[in-house]
């Protein structure tokens, strides 16, 4: 299957049922028939291993799993079994099952597999078990990834082998995986995946910061101030996620978020989502203050909203964390707009507002044709950096 094609469900009823079940459960899974010809690979597996520019990693449906045709596709995979050595380890782990299922034994199997695997055939001993597992190394985001794979044998009512399903998961235990995803929004995680490969995208930008944070940090206990910051960040992230945005870096008391047109649906939808997120967060601040035993006037956020026509957006993944960030002049300009919004204002640039279509503007109760703008340099709250870096940007309070 090419990188733009999803696999078709197998024709055999039992294989089809298995493919549909593992696809619905979003497992990493290979499915082969009784002769070890590939009949299905789940979308999540193919998306995980896809090279930049491809929706899915290509897979050699109809060919033997360990054939020359199947292994040749490793060159088109960014992650997974990308080298001959990794395929050799894979074959060593499950080759005993393959040998058991191959009419003609070692000689026949040696003719079916890629030449780089022929020497391993002599090491194998045939084995037929209902379930067979092993540890496989694969190329991951930050180097070699240890994965656990299990082969599940599929037999029909009279016990005839129909095929084998091989499922995989990262080596981390389920308790670790659930800890990483339990309170995470799956929609946001999927949006992050869309930007695994950095590129230029139009997007709305949101900057927000807590005013008088230094004074609060001096008058509150360290534990209380930490709790305030945590509540604020959680509220901000929730508002961004609910609006369909991407949470950026948390820097001190600051909040950064991006609303790409790609995932929002259109430039207008992205601009609307940005404004809605800011309004939702402003409404949530009262509860943050109350839970921190503060008055509403003690917790004041200022917002800067802007449009980036050519932001360079991408996911940064390290051994310890994953986040989405963006680079571009408009990101710095959004920060300058936010710094000028002293007094708890929400300043949006003219460029952002004019990306709203009539329906989205109406939903926000805004009339772009009647709004009046002021240049940053003319605001009484203009900072020196704003006057220096973005004096001509026109903004209005939304």
Image (tube, rainbow, N blue to C red):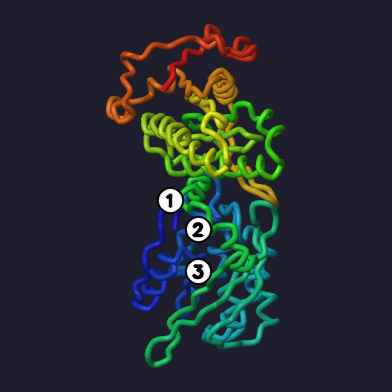
Q: Which residue is mark 1?
A: 4
Q: Mark 1 packing: few (<14 Cα in 10 Å), some, or many (20+)?
A: few
Numbered circles on residues, count = 3
Residue denoted by label 3: 30
Quadrant of the snapshot with the C terminus? top left
Q: Residues within 10 Å of mark 2 (few under 14, many from 20)?
A: many
Distance, label 1 to label 2, CA atoms, is 10 Å
Q: Residue at x 68, y 37 (%)?
A: 220
Provide the secondary structure element on which disc 2 rests.
helix
**First of labels 2, 3 by sequence position:** 3
Q: CA distance from mark 2 to mark 3?
A: 10 Å
Query: Which residue lies under the disc numbered 2?
Result: 46
**117 or 344, which is in the foreground?**
344
> In the drawing, does residue 10 fall left or right of residue 188?
left
Q: Is residue 383 left or right of residue 192?
A: right
Q: Does residue 233 appear in this view?
A: no
In this rendered view, identify the residue nearer to me: 205 or 75: 205
Lower position in the chain sequence, tag 1 or tag 2: 1
In the rendered image of this protein, does residue 238 appear above or below residue 358? below
x, y percent for residue 101: 53, 84
Residue lying farthest to the top in this orientation: 378
As helix, strand or loop, the secondary structure at mark 1 comes to loop
């Amino acid at each position: 299957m090419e990188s733009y094609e999803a696999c078709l469900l197998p024709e055999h009823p039992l294989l089809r049922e298995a493919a549909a079940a593992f696809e619905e459960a979003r497992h990493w899974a290979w499915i082969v028939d009784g002769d070890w010809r590939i009949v299905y690979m789940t979308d999540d597996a193919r998306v995980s291993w896809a090279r930049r520019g491809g929706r899915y990693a290509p897979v050699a449906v109809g060919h033997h799993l360990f054939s020359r045709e199947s292994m040749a596709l490793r060159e088109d995979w960014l992650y997974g079994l990308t080298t001959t050595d990794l395929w050799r380890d894979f074959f060593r782990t499950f080759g005993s099952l393959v040998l058991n299922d191959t009419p003609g034994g070692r000689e026949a199997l040696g003719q079916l597999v890629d030449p780089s695997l022929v020497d391993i055939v002599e090491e194998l001993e045939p084995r037929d078990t209902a379930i067979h597992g092993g540890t496989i190394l694969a190329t991951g985001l930050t180097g070699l990834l240890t994965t656990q794979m299990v082969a599940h044998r599929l037999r029909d009512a009279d016990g005839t082998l129909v095929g084998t399903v091989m499922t995989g998961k990262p080596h981390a235990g389920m308790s670790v995986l659930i800890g990483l995803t339990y309170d995470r929004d799956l929609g946001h995680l999927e949006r992050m995946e869309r930007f695994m490969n950095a590129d230029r995208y139009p997007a709305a930008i949101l900057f927000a910061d807590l005013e008088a944070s230094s004074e609060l940090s001096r008058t509150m206990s360290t534990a209380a101030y930490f709790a305030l910051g945590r509540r604020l960040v959680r509220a901000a992230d929730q508002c961004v996620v609910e609006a369909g945005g991407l949470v950026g870096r948390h820097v001190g008391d600051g909040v950064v978020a991006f609303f790409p047109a790609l995932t929002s649906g259109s430039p207008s939808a992205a601009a609307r989502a940005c404004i809605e997120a800011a309004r939702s967060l402003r409404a949530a601040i009262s509860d943050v203050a109350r839970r921190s035993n503060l008055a509403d006037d003690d917790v004041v956020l200022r917002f800067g909203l802007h449009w980036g026509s050519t932001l360079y957006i991408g996911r940064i993944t390290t051994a310890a964390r994953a986040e989405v960030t963006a680079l571009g002049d408009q990101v710095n300009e959004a920060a300058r707009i936010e710094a000028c919004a002293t007094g708890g204002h929400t300043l949006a640039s003219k460029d952002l507002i004019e990306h709203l279509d009539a329906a989205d503007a109406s939903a926000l109760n805004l009339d772009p044709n009647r709004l009046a703008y002021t240049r940053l340099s003319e605001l009484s709250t203009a900072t020196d950096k704003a006057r220096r870096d973005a004096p001509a940007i026109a903004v209005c309070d939304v």
